[in-house]
Amino acid sequence: MLAAEGIAKSYSSRPGRRAQRQAVLEEVTLRCAEGECLGIIGASGSGKSTLGRILLGLERPDQGKVTIDGRERAHRDAVSAVFQDYRSSIHPFFTVRQALLEPLRGKRLGRAETDRRLEEMLEQVGLDGSYLERYPHELSGGQAQRVCIARALLTGARWIVLDEAVSSLDASVQAQVLELLERIRGMHGIGYLFITHDLEAAAFLCDRIAILHEGRIVETLARGRLGEARHPYARELLALFRSGLGTGTGALNADKEGKG
Ligand SMILES: Nc1ncnc2c1ncn2[C@@H]1O[C@H](COP(=O)(O)OP(=O)(O)OP(=O)(O)O)[C@@H](O)[C@H]1O
């Protein structure tokens, strides 16, 4: 179980000035079981990416803790990430092979075993061995994001933080990558923390959706129970979604609330 308990984080809102701090997260508590997909949805500036970085161990909270199976500071290897900006996520001078080798460093695999793993992983994300020698600029956005997903899986992590991981892709490519993520979750039993502003995408992929508003999780809803939201902000968000004014891709054919 990946858990965050009582997370608080603030930043200095005016660097150099004294005691001017902006509270970004307050009392955030969540749990994500292995193999579960927990959506974290909220407007721009609500603190989603900050929470993602804390879950990844890239930043430390001012208060609270992140635990894996009850242990603190165990998350560095257990949690991996795929970010929105797939282009800068892969070093521009690295081939796909070099990018995918990064998480295997220190694993002492022979050349043949390494190649086998890389090709197998590429196939799992819908590419093949012919992509190994390509550079990032020779990939489409969807292909580059598939490489980032393959790299996250090669780390052997038990959870992946997907921070707006499909948001920069065209609508039809978004739908393909979401379907890929769902398939991979079934194959690997890996958990996702799916950070998004897109309720349609979250409703497609996630088992539960936590609604972040002004740094607090105001409500967490199971996918089939989105209609039961009680918090005014959650109800507003869902009403926008239903009226088609939400930020959804419009590319998904899923039965949003009934699926699963
Ligand atoms: N390192 C930092 N230093 C100072 N302020 C920061 C830092 N990181 C984030 N913030 C501030 O914290 C708030 C939340 O930012 P965050 O990126 O977590 O929000 P978000 O919900 O992911 O937004 P978006 O959807 O626009 O990416 C913002 O007001 C942002 O300016």
Image (tube, rainbow, N blue to C red):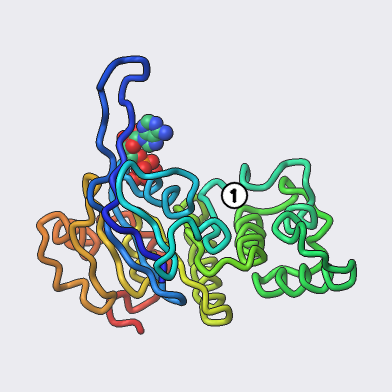
Q: In which quarter of the image is residue 176?
A: bottom right
Q: In which quarter of the image is residue 132?
A: bottom right
Q: In this view, does 188 lie above or below 31?
A: below
Count of marks placed on residues: 1
- In the rendered image, the quadrant that contains the N terminus is bottom left
User: Which residue does the image show at 34% across and 64% down from the upper left?
Assistant: 200
Q: Which residue lies furthest to the bottom in this view?
A: 260
Taking the image as four quarters, which one is ligand 1 found in? top left
Q: Which residue lies furthest to the front in this view?
A: 71
User: Which residue does the image show at 71% across and 71% down from the upper left?
Assistant: 121
Q: Is residue 38 above or below residue 214?
A: below
- Name the spot of residue 193 as percent of width and height, x first: 42, 63
> Label 1 is placed on what type of residue?
Tyr
Q: In this rendered view, identify the residue nearer to me: 160 or 8.
A: 8
- In the rendered image, the quadrant that contains the C terminus is bottom left
- Name the spot of residue 109 as percent of width and height, x first: 83, 68
Residue 46 shows up from this direction: no
- Name the spot of residue 237 as percent of width and height, x first: 20, 57
Q: Mark 1 points at which residue?
A: 86
Residue 148 shows up from this direction: yes
Q: Is mark 1 within 8 Å of ligand 1?
A: no
Q: In this view, does 242 lie above or below 27?
A: below
| Mark 1 burial class by Cα count in 10 Å: few <14, some 14-19, many 20+ | many
Residue 110 is left or right of residue 91, and the answer is right
Q: In this rendered view, identify the residue nearer to me: 96 or 61.
A: 61
- Name the spot of residue 191 as percent of width and height, x first: 47, 71
User: Which residue does the image show at 23% across and 46% down from the upper left?
Assistant: 26
Residue 225 is left or right of residue 95, and the answer is left
Check disc 1 and report its element: helix, strand or loop. Answer: helix
Residue 8 is left or right of residue 109, and the answer is left
